[in-house]
Amino acid sequence: MPGVTASTNTSLPFVVSDFATLAEGLDYAARGETGCNFFGRKGELRQSLTYREIRDLAVTMAQRFDKAGLKRGTRVAIVAETSPDFLVFFFACQYAGMIPVPLPLTIHLGGHDAYVTRLRSMIVKAGAEVAVGPAEMLHYLKEAAGSLKMIGTPEDFYALPFEGGALRPFTSDEACYIQYSSGSTSVPRGVLVSQQAITSNARGIGRHGLDLRQGDRSTSWLPLYHDMGLVGFCLTPMLSQITIDYLATKNFALRPLTWLKLISEHGSTISFSPTFGYELCVRRGLNGSAKTIDLSRWRVAGIGGEMVRAEILDRFVGTFGVTGFSAKAFLPSYGLAESTLAVTFTPLDQGVEVDRVDQEHFAQTGSVVSVKRNGIGSSRAARPFVICGVPLPDHEVEIRSELNVALPDHHIGRVVVRGPSVMDGYFNDPVATSAVFTDDGWLDTGDLGYMTDGRLVVTGRRKDLVILNGLNIWPQDVEWAVEALEDVRASDVACFSVIEPGEGERMIVVLQCRLHDVAARESLRKKVVATVRKTCGADCQVVLVPPKTLKFTSSGKLSRSAVREDYIAGEIFDLNLAVGQSGPARAAFSEQRK
């Protein structure tokens, strides 16, 4: 397709993230021919800018910031749409010595009021004085931002004078941006990412995780307000002069196969997705397009951002193997915003490696025993976990007990990390910062996992683990089993536990139900109870709720804690119990949950 930026620079030497600041990296990338391309939902090219053009626009905007009297260190809230404007304003902040704060674009986080409340909380927490967003989002932004120094669209800022404005770029020992953790819900926590942290992480990703090389090209539909989208598919490629092809997240959701079409047409070699992205493609199938899609050049198909489901990836290979896609391209990884992005990677060209553990042994003891290592026969239930690889150089991962004691291999505990990519703390939040660091300076990720031969296996979030009558239950196992039932869709289920007055701990399964017949709902409820009992040997209470009841993080992950809070607060009502009832009846049901 004419107009897209080049995959390879013809004369500029290839450098993998060997820069002290983002501005220094963009200055270098601007000397070449690579850049960024933005595509529509059918794969049509909408806009294309080389890194030189992005830098020129960013420098001019930085001069506008200075001319407008904005001081160095000013925080700038930017609604992170997938567009050239976001890149221009983000990098303009680097040249102006101002701190960009990417904000989520989607309003599908609970509706208008919830979205505005979320934006307002982020803006206030960051202490932003300037806010910019696309015209169609400006009314949300103004409602959330209140009275800042400047609020407007990109066009409003482009109209400001720049003659005489000075550049004040960040130095290597200064801040870079504020990244809100995707797990942030009602109380957002902004990670203050330093120049040293981002350049270190990009270097580790580029050299050791992905082995970036001349001619690589990346494709992304990941949101730029999320760490995997911003660091993995904006900053890291730029710091290695690699071209990026962008598809807006909402367009991917509508047409997942456009993602694969772009990889095919432009020879992309690197692209990442949470497991659900691969699943969406599998659901759509090839639709007769097998002869037109060529995925043979896709050498790194990364998975991150959520628990890796090996069976989904197997189905992807089964569906798209005819396009030349190789299962060895899969690259499981682990990371989090508090460590800039990446922490561990599996080896390249290895594909997915699974550790199958004795499910009954874990449920009873909380530790894991590999089926193959223990010689257990196929008659015992085995739970597959995908191995997420080894830490980046200069980074460390340990598994610790609740008493902060390091645990040996194959013992599940808290995943703690340290290294040059780890944050110094949450911005202006010393209480939250102290809560996630151990006394000896390691970051507690909030995840549970175990080590096996120096490799990390993540088993889930610590706060989500269900402990019922002495049994340890992974909530995602329950959710995935229920999702497999007829009349249940993916991401329709949330499992958690609560303490019921007079009854002790109880496992709750909240299911978004689309059935209208009361009898059909009750039949589904019985199937869910039976499925859960078969899956984990425990009973549960099933709550059938309308679609769009469950809450998700800004990165699209289910927020079990938020759903649990709604349940306890009495904001979740069972469809059959509440049908035809109002007033006192609904109030009584609500009171039962408190």
Image: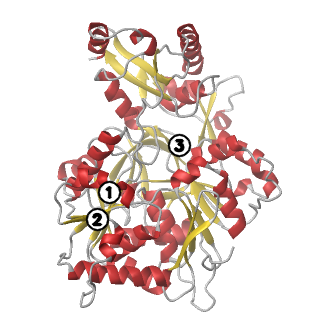
Marks 2 & 3, CB-CB < 8 Å contact: no
- Label drawn at residue 307: 3
- Helix, strand or loop status at disc 1: helix
Residue kind at label 1, given as amino acid type: Leu
Q: Is residue 575 above or below residue 413?
A: above
Please tell me which residue lies in front, 295 or 249: 249
Q: Amino acid at mark 2?
A: Gly
> In terms of depth relative to the viewer, which is nearer, 150 or 15?
150
- Circles 1 and 2: CB distance less than 8 Å? yes
Position in image of residue 252 (x %, y %): 58, 52
Looking at the image, is mark 2 or mark 3 nearer the viewer? 2
Q: Which residue is mark 2?
A: 152
Q: CA distance from mark 1 to mark 2?
A: 7 Å
Above or below 17: residue 282 = above
Label 1 crowd (10 A; few <14 / some 14-19 / many >=20): some
Name the residue type under label 3. Met
Instruction: Report helix, strand or loop for mark 3.
Output: loop
Q: Which corner quadrant of the image does residue 9 belong to?
A: bottom right
Q: At 62% from the left edge and 76% from the top edge, which residue is drawn?
A: 4
| Quarter of the C terminus within the rendering | top left
- In the picture of the structure, the residue carrying the numbered disc 1 is 138
Which numbered disc, 1 or 2, marks the residue that appears first in the sequence? 1
Q: What secondary structure is marked by label 2? A: strand
Which residue is nearer to you in this view: 301 or 263?
263
